[in-house]
């Protein structure tokens, strides 16, 4: 067994926790993989910020409609029961607390649930925020999906974010390639361990006072 | 007889002055009023403030307007994209001002302008660099940031069908900012694929009632389709 989950395996793990009837927004990038792992017999309604509920998968080649795209500007399809609406309504669905779950990527998540996913803070970087800040504060549950370590081996789950914040205390659960973490008012709990990752190893990697779920 | 129909995009934008604030609809290519943007480029107004979700893609449309040096400031949520090289170059050279706004705040500020709201408190961006220097308030135990409406002189939007009263329908996710931008501008100009006779549009499916629209111009083919 490989010691870490692949991106698709993380996506499958996230999909397992999305219940029937949930209204869900999948952020651009890694989180879009989650849609591929939702079982066909489970009714989950996908929201896209550019004005659609009931978004379906990518169309067959040649069937693309440039007026029918997702937040990543990729072509998508209509499912029976889908609806279109303007941008203020779309963001009211987030900001008004109507979405059950959003799944976002992250540069860093803090032990208090602060999220940093829009800007590295590098002086020459051109900032772009899109809908990230609205999703972060709006959905009832904010799931983060990311690899636990940066390319140079540092934990992205940290005591305090060093990157500019997207939202304060907004993340409820973090799915990584090594473990699943629940952010609670009492601290960070490890609820799932993957491969040969041990709880002790996570303590060392993160430097956080983690608890192990019973 | 009321007629908001105008014969050409040039006529629709003939009175845009230098220094105007212009809302431009679209999310990427979907709903982007390409022909109206081209007409604005041709018309020559400069020192413009442009509000759009993005900051131009490739070298046509909004990107061409930026490249021509006609835009002083852009208000948007997501300037950086794989093909935003025109904006990137101007921004790095200090030749364009950027006001970066979270997308929901952008939409709500536009909606608020159209609805006559003086300002509103929003939870979005609280505690982040994009709320720096802004008034905040705790309401029922939650922190909010004060945001002001975003009024404009013009709105350029792309709809699907329109009639001589200015009623508009849209197509799929190309609706995006169209209805709220139409309501927030002094002069909303809509380009449409097709002009419908009065009474032909299903009143139940009119997403922008004509009261919000001043000018309607027919373009013909759906452009996003040809460009894709």
Image (tube, grey):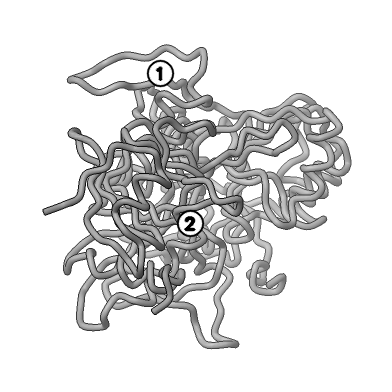
Classify residue A198 as left or right of residue A165: left
Q: Is residue B5 above or below residue A114?
A: below
Along the line of sight, the residue nearer the viewer: A96 or B116: A96
- Marks counted in the figure total 2
Q: Which residue is mark 2?
A: B175
Q: Position of residue A55 (x, y in %)?
A: 37, 69
- Which residue does the image show at 27% across and 42% down from the upper left? A210
Q: Is residue A212 visible?
A: yes
Give the residue furthest to the left. Answer: A214
Classify residue B30 as left or right of residue A126: left
- Which residue does the image show at 21% across and 44% down from the upper left? A211
Q: Secondary structure at mark 2?
A: loop
Chain letter for the residue marked with disc 1 in the picture? B
Q: Which residue is mark 1?
A: B146
Q: Position of residue A19 (x, y in %)?
A: 18, 66
Chain letter for the residue marked with disc 2 in the picture? B
Q: Earlier in the sequence, mark 1 or mark 2?
A: 1
Q: Is residue A103 above or below residue B121?
A: below
- Which residue does the image show at 75% across and 30% down from the upper left? B48
Along the line of sight, the residue nearer the viewer: A107 or A125: A107
Corner quadrant of residue A79 = bottom left
Along the line of sight, the residue nearer the viewer: A52 or A192: A192
């Amino acid at each position: 067994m490989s010691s870490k989950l692949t991106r698709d395996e993380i996506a499958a793990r996230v999909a397992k926790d999305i219940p029937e009837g949930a209204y869900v927004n999948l952020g651009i990038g890694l989180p879009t993989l989650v849609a591929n792992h939702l079982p066909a017999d489970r009714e989950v309604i996908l929201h896209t910020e550019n004005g659609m509920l009931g978004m379906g998968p990518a169309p067959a080649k040649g069937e693309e409609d440039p007026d029918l795209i997702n937040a990543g500007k990729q072509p998508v399809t209509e499912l029976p029961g889908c609806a279109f609406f303007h941008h203020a309504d779309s963001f009211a669905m987030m900001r008004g607390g109507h979405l059950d779950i959003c799944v976002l990527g992250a540069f860093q998540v803090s032990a208090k649930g602060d999220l940093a996913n829009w800007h590295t803070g590098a002086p020459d970087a051109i900032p772009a925020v899109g809908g990230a800040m609205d999703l972060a504060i709006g959905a009832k549950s904010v799931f983060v999906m990311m690899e636990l370590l940066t390319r140079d081996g540092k934990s992205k789950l940290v005591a305090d974010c060093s990157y500019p914040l997207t939202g304060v205390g907004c993340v409820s659960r973090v799915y990584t390639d090594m473990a699943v973490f629940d952010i609670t008012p009492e601290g960070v709990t490890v609820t799932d361990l993957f491969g040969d990752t041990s709880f002790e190893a996570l303590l060392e990697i993160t430097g956080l006072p983690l608890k192990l779920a019973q | 007889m009321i007629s908001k129909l105008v014969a050409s995009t040039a006529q629709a934008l003939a009175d845009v002055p230098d220094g105007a604030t212009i809302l431009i609809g679209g999310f990427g290519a979907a709903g982007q009023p390409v022909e109206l943007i081209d007409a604005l480029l041709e018309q020559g107004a400069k020192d413009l403030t442009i509000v759009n979700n993005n900051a131009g893609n490739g070298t046509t449309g909004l990107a061409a307007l930026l490249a021509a040096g006609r835009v002083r400031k852009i208000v948007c949520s997501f300037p950086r994209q794989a093909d935003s090289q025109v904006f990137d170059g101007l921004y790095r050279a200090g030749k364009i001002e950027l006001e970066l706004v979270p997308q929901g705040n952008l939409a709500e500020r536009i909606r608020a302008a159209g609805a006559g709201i003086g300002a509103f408190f929003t939870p979005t961006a609280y505690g982040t660099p994009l709320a720096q220097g802004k008034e905040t308030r705790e309401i029922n135990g939650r922190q909010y940031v004060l945001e002001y409406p975003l009024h404009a002189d013009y709105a350029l939007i792309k709809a699907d069908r329109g009639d001589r009263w200015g009623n508009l329908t849209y197509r799929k996710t190309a609706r995006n900012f169209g209805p709220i931008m139409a309501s927030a501008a002094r002069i909303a100009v809509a380009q449409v694929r097709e002009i419908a006779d009065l009474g032909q549009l299903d009143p139940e499916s009119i997403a922008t009632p004509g009261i919000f629209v001043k000018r309607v111009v027919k373009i013909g083919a759906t452009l996003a389709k040809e460009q894709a």
